[in-house]
Image (cartoon, helix red, strand yellow):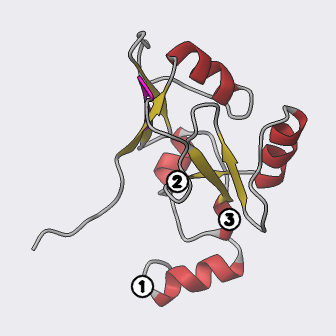
C-alpha cells in the first residue's frame, strides 16, 4: 500500500485572483511561484505552495478548513483584527476569507509540522520548537 508523505499544495477557490492576493497579502508576506493569471496564482511556501483558483461558487465552509503555519500567530491575529476580519470564537485562530474559506493559523514552534534546516535556510528563517512540540515529534521518532 502507498504511504502518504506530505501535502504538496492546497487549492483554494476564490472569486478573483487579484483581490485574493491583495487580501492575503495584507496579513502574510507573499512570494509567487510564477506569474499569476486571471484564473490562478501560486503562493510559494518554501517546499510547498497554495494554489488560488478563480471561480468560487460553493457556500461558506463550516467544518472544512486548511491550516497555515506562521512564525508569529499573535502578530497575525492583531493584523486580522485591525483589518476587521471575522475571527471564529474559541481558543484557536480561525478566520474566514472573503470567499468563505476557513483558515486556521498555528505557530511553527508549537506544532509538530517541520521544515528541514535546508528549507528554513532557503526561506531565510530561523525557527525552533517548544518542548511540547519536540516531545510530540520524539514520540513519533521524528526528532532526537
Which comes before the other along the chain, label 2 or label 1?
Answer: 2
Left or right: 80, with 19 as reference point: right
Viewer can see residue 84: yes
Task: Report the predominant secondary structure element of the magenta stretch.
Answer: strand
Q: Tell me where residue 142 appears, x and y as whole percent.
A: 44, 78
Residue 56 in which image quadrant: top left
Residue at (78, 68) in percent of width and height? 91
Q: Tell me where residue 2 appears, x and y as whole percent.
A: 13, 68
- Depth-wise, is mark 2 or mark 1 nearer the camera? 2
Q: Tell me where residue 13 appears, x and y as whole percent.
A: 44, 32
- 54 part of magenta stretch: yes
Q: Residue furthest front?
A: 59
Disc 2 versus disc 3: distance between alpha carbons?
Answer: 21 Å
Question: Which of these two is toward me, 137 or 43?
Answer: 43
Q: Is residue 91 above or below residue 23?
A: below
Which segment is the magenta one?
A: 50-56
Query: Element at badge 3?
Result: helix
Query: Element at badge 1?
Result: loop
Q: Which mark is residue 65?
A: 2
Q: Which residue is mark 3?
A: 109
Disc 1 versus disc 3: distance between alpha carbons?
Answer: 18 Å
**Label 2: how many residues lie within 10 Å, few (<14), some (14-19) or many (20+)?**
some
Residue at (76, 53) in percent of width and height? 73
Amino acid at each position: 500500500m502507498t504511504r502518504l508523505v506530505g501535502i504538496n499544495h492546497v487549492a483554494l477557490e476564490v472569486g478573483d485572483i487579484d483581490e485574493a492576493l491583495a487580501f492575503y497579502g495584507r496579513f502574510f508576506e507573499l512570494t509567487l511561484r510564477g506569474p499569476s493569471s486571471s484564473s490562478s496564482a501560486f503562493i510559494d511556501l518554501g517546499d510547498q505552495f497554495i494554489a488560488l483558483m478563480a471561480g468560487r461558487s460553493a457556500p461558506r465552509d463550516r467544518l472544512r478548513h486548511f491550516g497555515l503555519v506562521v512564525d508569529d500567530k499573535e502578530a497575525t491575529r492583531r493584523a486580522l483584527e485591525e483589518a476587521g476580519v471575522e475571527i471564529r470564537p474559541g481558543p484557536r485562530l480561525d478566520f474566514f476569507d472573503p470567499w468563505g474559506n476557513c483558515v486556521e493559523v498555528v505557530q511553527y514552534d508549537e506544532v509538530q509540522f517541520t521544515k528541514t534546516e535546508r528549507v528554513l535556510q532557503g526561506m531565510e528563517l530561523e525557527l525552533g520548537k517548544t518542548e511540547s512540540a519536540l516531545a510530540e515529534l520524539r514520540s513519533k521518532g521524528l526528532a532526537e
